[in-house]
Image: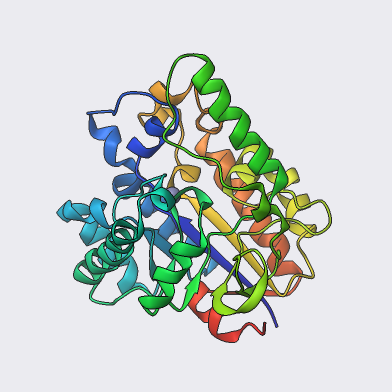
Amino acid sequence: MRLCAISVDLDEIPNYFAIHGLPEPTGPERSLVYDVAVDRLTALADELDLPLTLFAIGDDLTRPHAAAKLRAAHQLGFEIANHSLDHRYDLVRLGREAIRRQIEGGADAIEQAVGARPVGFRAPGYTITDEVFEVLGDLGTEYDSSVFPCPEYWAAKAVKIGLISAVGRKSRSIVDTPRVLTAPTRPYRIGRPYWRRGGGLLELPVQVTRGLRMPFFGTSITMGGPAVARGLARMCVGEPLVNLELHGIDVLDASDGLEALRPHQVDVRVAKGRKVDALRAAIGALRHAGYGFVTLREAAGRIEV
Ligand SMILES: [Zn+2]
């Protein structure tokens, strides 16, 4: 059976200000992902009968309202996975002890909020190293989903960081080694270095299309609109697992309180209704092609590598 797992990284709004090197917001827009986006995602999941996997950042859960939202999602049957303790874009540069604190601390916070320990991990900014994988192995992680072997995304990120520094600001985002672009695009057990196959941890790479390896994720779907979304989805048909990664911000737009991001981030200019229509189109195309929808944990248990 063809499997599709849809996961959502619940990166809260200050992370986007940090990417653009902008000062942190202080108003209610700080928590739009938990306060608004999670409800929209839950409604979409209900409408389309999707078991979502939510990647939560531990530190966000110190806010009781966010912890309650996540607990409710868990009770609906969503998988809650670990997106680190506080989403340091430079996680890979922190040294082993701090890396361990980031991963273990994220898992502890999630367990405290929802009553179940997460088994999956995704690194902030798709940036991972052999050292991070070693820590994940030590901590008994069942799967990782951080590798994004997408030349277009990698180049766009490098250019964006350069442009931000050219206007005198400093992005907190960092660029990974281009060797990640040689990693398998289908689930594999990592070797050493991690972009080679081996007998290590199970990696579920973030989805790229067949052939050209174009990004098939929330940004390309919501920016492209329904027709492009359907086309990208069809270019993934045939993959044993489609690992579709979204972000909470994919169901928000500038009118939700993100006007300050509008000059810096093009996807907030797209109306949320159109974004959700594009997501429906992509998901519909996969369903039409015979894909069944599962959590990443279930995919990890069923996929043959
Ligand atoms: Zn993230």
Q: Determine the image quadrant of residue 163.
A: top right
Camera-side residue: 233 or 208? 208
Question: So how many labels did they put on this image?
Answer: 0
Q: Residue at x 41, y 45 (%)?
A: 90
Q: Residue at x 50, y 44 (%)?
A: 250
Up/down of 240 relative to 213, above or below: below
Q: Determine the image quadrant of residue 148.
A: bottom right
Task: Please state, as top left, top right, bottom left or bottom right, where the N terminus lies in the image.
Answer: bottom right
Considering every residue shown, the one lying at the far top of the view is 167
Colour scheme of the rendered structure: rainbow
Spot occupied by residue 305 in the image (x, y as percentages of width and height): 67, 82
Q: Residue at x 67, y 61 (%)?
A: 284
Left or right of 5? Residue 31 is left
Camera-side residue: 141 or 7? 141
Spot occupied by residue 180 in the image (x, y as percentages of width and height): 64, 55
- Asked whether residue 291 appears in the rendered view, the answer is yes
Left or right of 234? Residue 197 is left
Q: Residue at x 44, y 33 (%)?
A: 19
Camera-side residue: 131 or 174? 131
Considering every residue shown, the one lying at the far right of the view is 211
Spot occupied by residue 30 in the image (x, y as percentages of width and height): 28, 36
- Asked whether residue 149 appears in the rendered view, the answer is no
Camera-side residue: 174 or 206? 174
Spot occupied by residue 218 in the image (x, y as percentages of width and height): 58, 48
